[in-house]
C-alpha cells in the first residue's frame, strides 16, 4: 500500500452532499445525449425495456457493491482492491477502470464541448426560426469543422480540471446541489411541449411500446453497457465516491435514490426527444447528433424558447461537468494513491492527456482532418466480424460496451465471492444500525445473476450461440 494510509481524508460535508455528488456523476450526457441516440438506433422501446431490466437486476447491486468497497477501504479503486486482497491480481480491476476513465473522459468531453457550443448558439439565437433541415445542416457543419469543436472540448476539459483542482469538498459538492434540480424542471417542460406537438404519438409509441423483433444481439450488449455507463459503474467512480460517504449514511438508500433519479432523467429525455423526432419528420437513428438536431426544433415551438434553450444547454453542460469530474477523480486518485503524485500534478497530467486524446476524438469526426482517415476495430456482430470505425466511436464502443461491463462483472464477483461476509454486513448495516432483510437477494445478484448475464451477453456477441 502507498504512503497515504494515514492521510486525512476529504469527505462530503453532509448526507445530501454525498447524494448530490453521486447523482451528479450518474446524471449526465449518458442520460440526455447517449440514451436517446442508442434507443433511436436500436429499435426503440425494446432497448428501453432491456435497459431497465439491467438497471434493476445488475446496476443496483453493482452500485451498492462499489459504494461498499469504497467506504470500507476509504480508498479508491486500485488501492481499495489492494487493501482488501493484498498480493492478488484483483487490483487489475481498478487498473482497467483507470484505463476506461481515460477513454470515457476523452470522448465525453467532446460531446460536452458541443453542449457549450449549443449554449452559445442559443445565446446568439443562431437556430431561431430555422427549419429542421437547416438545424440538421448546422450540426453537420459544426462537427465537421476541425477546430471549433476542439476549441469547445478544450474549454470544457479546463472546466473539469479546474473543479477537480479545487478538491472534493469545495469543488464537487457545491456545484451538484442546486443546478441538477433545475435541469430536471426544464426537461419536464420540454417533455410537455414535445408530447403535445402534432404527430407526437408515434414517437411516444416508438419509445414506450416494445417491438422485440427489432432487438439485436448488439442491442442487448449496448443496453447492458449503457446501464453501467449511465449509472457510472464498472470503473471505480462509485468506489471513489463511496469512500467519501459518511459512516452513518445508508448505502442502500443512496443507491436506490441515485438509480431512480438517473433512470427518471433518461426516461424524461426520451419523452422529450422521440415525440419531437416524429413530429418534425426526422429520423430516430440519426446517431450522435440526435439531441442537437431535434431539441432546437422544440425550443422553436416554445414561448420563451431562447431562454429555455440557453438554460437547457447550459445545465446540460453542468450535468456533464458533474460527471466528468467524477471520471477525472478516478484518474487523479489513482496517481495520488498509487504513484505518489501530488494532487495538482495528477490533475494536470490527467487534464493534458485526456484533452489531447479528446481532441483526436473530435478531429476523427472531421472529414478535413487526417485523423478521420484512421480507423480502428469494433465487434458489432460476430457474423460480420470486426468493423472499422473512427477513433471517437472506437473509444465509445470499447469503453461502454466492453470495459465497463467487464469491470462490473469483476466487481460483482469480488464482492459476491471474495469479500468477507462480516465486512459486507458491517458496512451495509452501518455497524448494525440498519437491518438487512434483502441481504440474500443482493448477494445472489452479485454472485450469480450479474456474472452470468454479463458472460452470456459477451459470449453471444462473440458468436458462441448461433
Ligand atoms: N454516468 C455518466 C453519464 O451518464 C457518465 C459516466 C460514466 C460517469 C462512467 C462516470 C463513469 O453521463
Image (cartoon, grey):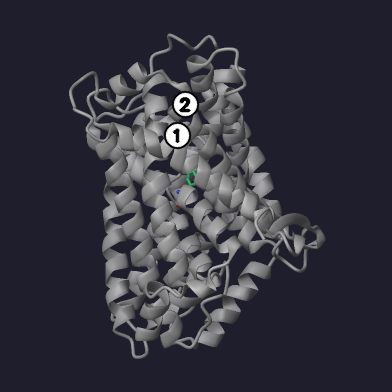
Q: Is residue 1 above or below residue 193?
A: above
Please, which residue is most extreme toward the bottom here? 198
Quarter-of-image position of residue 438: top left
Secondary structure of the residue carrying tag 1 is helix
> Can the viewer see residue 384 in this picture?
yes
The answer to whether the residue labelled 2 contacts the one labelled 1, judged by CB atoms less than 8 Å apart, is yes
Residue at 44% across, 28% down: 415
Quarter-of-image position of residue 129: bottom left
Q: From the viewer's perspective, tell me whether residue 3 is left or right of residue 423.
A: right
Residue at 19% across, 27% down: 434
Q: Nearer the viewer, residue 184 or 151?
A: 184
The residue identified by callout 2 is 417
Residue 89 location, x and y as percent?
A: 62, 21
Residue at 61% across, 56% down: 151
The residue identified by callout 1 is 447
Q: Nearer the viewer, residue 458 or 429?
A: 458
Alpha-carbon neighbours of circle 1 within 10 Å: few (<14), some, or many (≥20)? Answer: some
Amino acid at each position: 500500500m502507498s504512503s497515504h494510509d494515514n492521510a486525512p481524508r476529504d469527505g462530503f460535508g453532509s448526507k445530501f452532499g454525498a447524494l448530490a455528488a453521486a447523482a451528479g456523476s450518474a446524471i449526465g450526457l449518458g442520460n440526455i445525449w447517449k440514451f436517446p441516440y442508442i434507443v433511436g438506433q436500436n429499435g426503440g422501446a425494446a432497448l428501453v425495456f432491456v435497459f431497465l431490466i439491467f438497471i434493476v437486476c445488475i446496476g443496483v447491486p453493482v452500485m451498492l457493491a462499489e459504494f461498499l468497497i469504497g467506504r470500507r477501504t476509504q480508498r479508491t479503486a486500485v488501492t481499495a482492491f489492494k487493501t482488501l486482497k493484498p498480493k492478488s491480481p484483483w487490483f487489475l480491476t481498478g487498473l482497467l477502470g483507470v484505463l476506461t476513465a481515460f477513454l470515457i473522459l476523452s470522448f465525453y468531453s467532446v460531446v460536452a464541448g458541443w453542449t457549450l457550443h449549443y449554449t452559445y448558439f442559443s445565446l446568439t439565437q443562431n437556430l431561431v426560426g430555422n427549419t429542421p433541415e437547416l438545424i440538421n445542416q448546422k450540426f453537420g457543419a459544426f462537427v465537421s469543422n476541425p477546430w471549433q469543436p476542439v476549441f469547445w472540448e478544450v474549454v470544457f476539459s479546463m472546466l473539469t480540471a479546474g473543479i477537480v483542482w479545487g478538491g472534493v469538498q469545495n469543488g464537487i459538492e457545491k456545484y451538484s446541489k442546486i443546478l441538477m434540480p433545475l435541469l430536471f424542471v426544464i426537461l419536464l417542460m420540454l417533455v410537455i411541449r414535445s408530447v403535445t406537438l402534432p404527430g407526437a404519438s408515434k414517437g411516444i409509441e416508438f419509445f414506450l411500446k416494445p417491438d422485440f423483433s427489432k432487438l439485436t444481439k448488439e442491442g442487448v450488449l449496448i443496453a447492458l453497457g449503457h446501464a453501467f455507463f449511465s449509472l457510472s459503474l464498472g470503473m471505480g467512480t462509485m468506489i471513489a465516491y463511496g469512500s467519501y460517504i459518511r459512516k452513518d449514511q445508508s448505502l442502500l438508500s443512496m443507491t436506490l435514490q441515485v438509480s431512480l433519479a438517473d433512470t427518471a432523467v433518461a426516461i424524461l429525455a426520451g419523452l422529450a426527444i422521440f415525440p419531437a423526432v416524429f413530429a418534425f419528420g426526422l429520423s430516430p437513428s440519426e446517431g450522435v447528433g440526435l439531441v442537437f438536431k431535434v431539441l432546437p426544433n422544440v425550443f422553436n415551438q416554445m414561448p420563451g424558447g431562447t431562454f429555455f434553450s440557453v438554460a437547457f444547454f447550459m445545465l446540460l453542460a453542468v450535468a456533464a461537468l458533474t460527471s466528468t469530474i467524477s471520471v477525472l477523480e478516478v484518474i487523479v486518485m489513482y496517481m495520488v494513491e498509487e504513484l505518489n503524485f501530488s494532487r495538482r500534478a495528477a490533475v494536470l497530467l490527467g487534464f493534458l492527456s485526456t484533452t489531447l486524446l479528446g481532441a483526436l476524438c473530435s478531429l476523427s469526426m472531421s472529414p478535413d482532418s487526417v485523423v478521420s482517415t484512421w480507423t480502428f476495430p469494433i465487434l458489432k456482430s460476430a457474423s460480420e466480424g470486426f468493423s472499422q470505425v473512427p477513433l471517437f466511436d472506437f473509444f465509445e464502443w470499447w469503453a461502454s460496451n466492453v470495459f465497463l461491463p467487464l469491470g462490473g462483472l469483476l466487481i460483482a464477483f469480488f464482492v459476491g465471492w471474495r469479500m468477507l461476509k462480516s465486512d459486507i454486513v458491517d458496512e451495509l448495516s452501518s455497524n448494525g444500525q440498519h437491518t438487512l432483510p434483502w441481504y440474500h437477494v443482493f448477494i445472489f445478484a452479485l454472485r450469480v445473476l450479474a456474472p452470468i448475464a454479463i458472460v452470456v451477453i459477451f459470449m453471444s456477441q462473440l458468436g458462441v450461440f448461433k
